Image (spheres, rainbow, N blue to C red):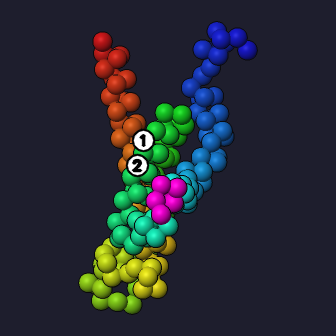
Amino acid sequence: MSGRENMTTSPAVMRDTRKRGVWWAFPFHQILSTVGVLALAGLLTFIVSPVPRARWILTETPYFPVQIALAFLIGLVLPRFLRHWLMQWVWVLPFSILCVSFILAPLPLVGRFGRYFGWGCRPELGCFVQLAVTLPFYAAAAYALAAFLRSTIQRQRGQHETAS
């Protein structure tokens, strides 16, 4: 097919091709935004810090700054290479899991907030709820937010370029 024939492809054919070609995109981004970010954050932190400090940085601070920053960075850079609109929706599954877990926790409301979002649950105390439930949501939300910001910036640049 020559370049000229490619330019005359109908929008319906292009939509159909896009739908068939990215069946793997949502599971890929879901895994990358949660498990991939956590593994990469662990690897990078253990490379640059001694083991006790790296463990403290990764697991014993309730707001997980390394994982959130890395997820945001990957979510900001990756849309340059993979333009999947699904990247913006990877927060939904971890958020659903967080909500169900939060609601079903047999604790008073204040205790739930401390357990899921504060200092009330730490691995050194034998509590892994934040690592298993809250952290994947934080990472996926940062990844999705960055992908959304990137697409918004690209869309605005495209509007400015067509207006010029």
Give the x, y percent position of residue 45: 48, 58
Q: Label 2 belongs to which residue?
A: 72
Closest to the observer, 48 or 82:
48
Give the x, y percent position of residue 106: 39, 90
Q: How crowded is mark 1: few (under 14 residues within 10 Å), some or many (20 or more)?
A: many
Measure the C-alpha gap from mark 1 to mark 2.
Answer: 6 Å
Give the x, y percent position of residue 42: 51, 60
Q: Can residue 136 be seen in this view?
A: no
Magenta residues, start to end: 45-50
Q: Is residue 86 magenta?
A: no
Q: Can residue 42 be seen in this view?
A: yes
Residue flagged by tag 1: what amino acid is it?
Answer: Leu
Q: Residue at x 36, y 59 (%)?
A: 65
Residue flagged by tag 2: what amino acid is it?
Answer: Phe
Q: Label 1 belongs to which residue?
A: 76
Q: Does the magenta stretch include residue 48?
A: yes
